[in-house]
Structure formats: structure tokens, C-alpha cells
Image: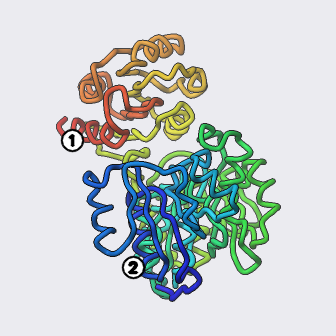
Amino acid sequence: MRNYTDLQHKKVLVLGLAKSGVAAAEILHELGAFVTVNDSKPFDESPDAQGLLQKGITVICGRHPEDLLDEGFELVVKNPGIPYSNKIVADAISREIPVWTEIELAYLISEAPFIGITGSNGKTTTTTLIFDMLNNGSPEPLIAGNIGTVACGVAREATKDNVIVTELSSFQLMGIKTFKPKIAILTNLYEAHLDYHGTFDNYAEAKCAVTRNQDESDYFIYNADQPIVVDYATKSNAKKVPFSSQGRMDEGISADDTTIYWQGEPYLERANIALPGKHNLENILAAVAACILVGCDKAKMEEVLTKFGGVRHRTQFVREWNGRKIYNDSKATNCLATKSALDAFQAPVILLAGGLDRGHSLEELRPCMSHVKGVVAFGETGLRFVEFAKSCGVQQTVIAQNVEDAVHYAAPMSAEGDVILLSPACASWDQYDSFEIRGDVFIDAVMKL
């Protein structure tokens, strides 16, 4: 950990615990700050708060005092999920107290450079691919951020021989001041999290903060197939590396039906790449570009790309069963994600879909239903999915009780050469606590076939 001294003897409020708050509080304490932690969970129900108190950190639990900032705090480090409309956060901003997320702290203490990956879709797949391709190489990669590992905790252990591959949400990026990745990636921009950001413009600005502090010594890898992303790229001061899946380009990284090109020259053959789908091709292009820029061995990249079957719950290849290929895309909680999954396949598909009914239209799926030969629907939207499938000309439809039941309907409905795809297009909360649990139930049922 770099000996960062600017926070020594400063009063810092850590707002919200969870993993990121605990890690931030501990590191700030080590850096010599006077740390106070505030969390809504009662103290006697919070082992994290109890542990921090034992380390000499002030803890205020069970409430958020409205006069908390009167104690003279010079910095607030907040949990990314806490909105800026929160009274304490809004009060801090009105008092011109800096408000960070732990990503900023991670950057300030890190001896290792960052690869920062953001975008509406594809962040986790791109992050995981980069990590896997760089693994066992030089520099040695560490993985962090929104993917589940707290960035400042990883940065505390990193050395100059590492590179930190970091998945970044818009929530995290809103809380940066100097964060400057050596390589920044923007996969795409679609409407998301408007309940948090208020408008799409605010959301897009937060995402594009990934390149805000970059200069000509850095690289910005961006989606050249999205005009809005191209517009934002013009504002970046980094060296620009566009990617496109629409055919060969003379600059950046691109692909046609057979080949991936680097700076216009053939670089990799697509035939041996395991991960299906146009959206995943975009993720692959961004990941390969990043790995080239840090000097990754080409053979290592090819080895990973021929075996990488997807991130768990994200168009994840589960198994082949009696000539059927079975995929788990439980992370697809909206129609756009399911559309991308369906577009990834040319073989006939048995689609397992349904879940929480938020009243959204299914019409976005209609253009990609032509090769869906059967639909097994479940959850609150089960009946709506069946009626929609029939209107698309799907001949085989059935309503199942749940995901496990759906697998037992899908197996006999399919034929050799078909794809069985769980891609719900809905949130899981009507029947499962998370999309991860829903996907795990699906995998268990599939493995029992």
C-alpha cells in the first residue's frame, strides 16, 4: 500500500458499512484519519461495527443523526448504493464536503495501475475475460470492484508488479475525484438506474467519468458501434482505441464473420472462440484490446478464448445433454438482455422465461423469436409469456410452477441440436431472492437430467 499522507489527522465519515464500508474505514484508520462510521443497522446486530469499535474507530449505529456533519468532517466516504438524495449526503454536498466512494480511496493508496471497465452491459464478462487472459502473466492481475471484491481492500495488498482489473458501476464512478485508470473501457450505454440518476444524461455522465481524468499516457477503449459512446469518446484526452463488431477497421480492434483485426491486420480467428453472441463478441474485442495494450501473450489469450464459457448466470454454458446445449442466463432480468441472448444463437431454442411482473412490454423480444421453437414460462409473468409466444408463432408453450419444473418440461420439448436457454427477461423476486439463486436452481436441475 502506498503511504498516502493527505488524510492524516482529517475527520472522515464513512456512511454505510457492508464490505466496502468496513474496508474503507479500516484503511482510513491505518492512514491516520479520525474515522467515524455511521450505519442504520443496530450496533448489537452488526459484527462489522463491533469489530471496528474494537480497533478504535468511532461507531454510530441504528440511526442517521441529521446533525451528524456538525462535528466538522472534512470528507465523506459513502457506500455506492446510498443515493445523493440522502439527507446526510445532500448536506455534505451543500457544505462543500467532498463525497467519495471507496474506488477513489483505492486509487490513492494503490501501487498498481488500474484497468477500469464500465458500461450498461458486459462489464462482468469483459472484466473476467481480461483477468483470465492476464492470469499467470506479467503484470500479475488482481480483480476488484463491482464484481464482488472491494477495490480498496485489493489495492491495499497490490504492488507495482500487479494490475488491478476493476469492474466499475455508475454509482461508484460518481464518487471519484482523481481516479485515473491506465486503461479505461466503456462497453456500451443503455438506459439504466434512472431511479438513482434521475436522467439518462446523468447516468451517461457518471459512466463516462471512467475516462475523465485520463491523459495522453492512458488508453480509452470504447464501443465505436454506438454513436452516443463515440460522442463521449471525443471528450477523452486518452489515446483512443475503438472496437467494432461490424467489420474490419483500420484502427483499434474490430471483427468480421471470420477474423478479429488489430489495427487493421488479422490477429485472431473467430472459429475457435467458445463464447457465443454478438454482445459477447463486443466484450471479447474490448478485453483483447486491453490485454494487447499491457503486453499479454497472444497464446494465452487464444487458450482462454477457446475455453471460456461465460460468467456464471450470464449466457453461461452449463452442459451438453443428449445433443442439446444448455445455457444459464439468469442475469437477464430485462427484455434487452434476453434479446441479446437469443441473438447469440442460430440453432432452434427452447426458451425458459418469466418472473416478477413489473408490467413491462415483451414486444422488444418479437424480432428475435423466429428461431424459438418452444417457451416454458414460469412466475408472475408466466401467462403473459405464453400468450406472447403464441402471438409470435411459437408452437410449443407450457406454464411451469418454477425454474426446476421448467427444466423438466424443456428437456422432452427439445430435440438433438437444440439450445435450451434460461433467459428470464424478468427479475427473480417473485419466487427467488436473487437471480443467482434462480440460476443455481436451474443448474442443479440441469445436472440431474
The residue tagged with tag 1: helix, strand or loop?
Answer: helix
Disc 2: which residue: 136
Classify mark 1: residues with Cα within 10 Å, few (<14), some (14-19) or many (20+).
few
Colouring mode (rainbow / by chain / secondary structure / one colour): rainbow
Q: Which mark is first along the chain, 1 or 2?
A: 2
Q: Amino acid at mark 2?
A: Asn
Residue at position x 58%, y 22% from top? 366
The quadrant holding residue 236 is bottom right
Work out whether residue 278 or residue 387 is closer to the camera in this orientation and state it: 387
Q: CA distance from mark 2 to mark 1?
A: 31 Å
Work out whether residue 186 or residue 59 is closer to the camera in this orientation and state it: 59
The quadrant holding residue 215 is bottom right
In the drawing, does residue 205 fall left or right of residue 389?
A: right
In the drawing, does residue 241 fall left or right of residue 108?
A: right
| Residue 199, position as x, y percentages in the image | 70, 40
Work out whether residue 254 or residue 355 is closer to the camera in this orientation and state it: 355
Residue at position x 30%, y 38% from top? 323
The residue tagged with tag 2: helix, strand or loop?
Answer: loop
Looking at the image, can residue 268 be seen?
A: no
Residue at position x 70%, y 41% from top? 200
In the drawing, does residue 238 fall left or right of residue 132?
A: right
Relative vertical location of residue 204 with respect to residue 37 in this rendering, above or below:
above
Work out whether residue 421 or residue 428 is closer to the camera in this orientation and state it: 428
Q: Amino acid at mark 1?
A: Met
Disc 1: which residue: 447
Classify mark 2: residues with Cα within 10 Å, few (<14), some (14-19) or many (20+).
few
In the drawing, does residue 67 fall left or right of residue 261?
A: left
The quadrant holding residue 235 is bottom right
| Residue 402, position as x, y percentages in the image | 28, 24
Dot 2 and dot 1 residues touching (CB under 8 Å): no
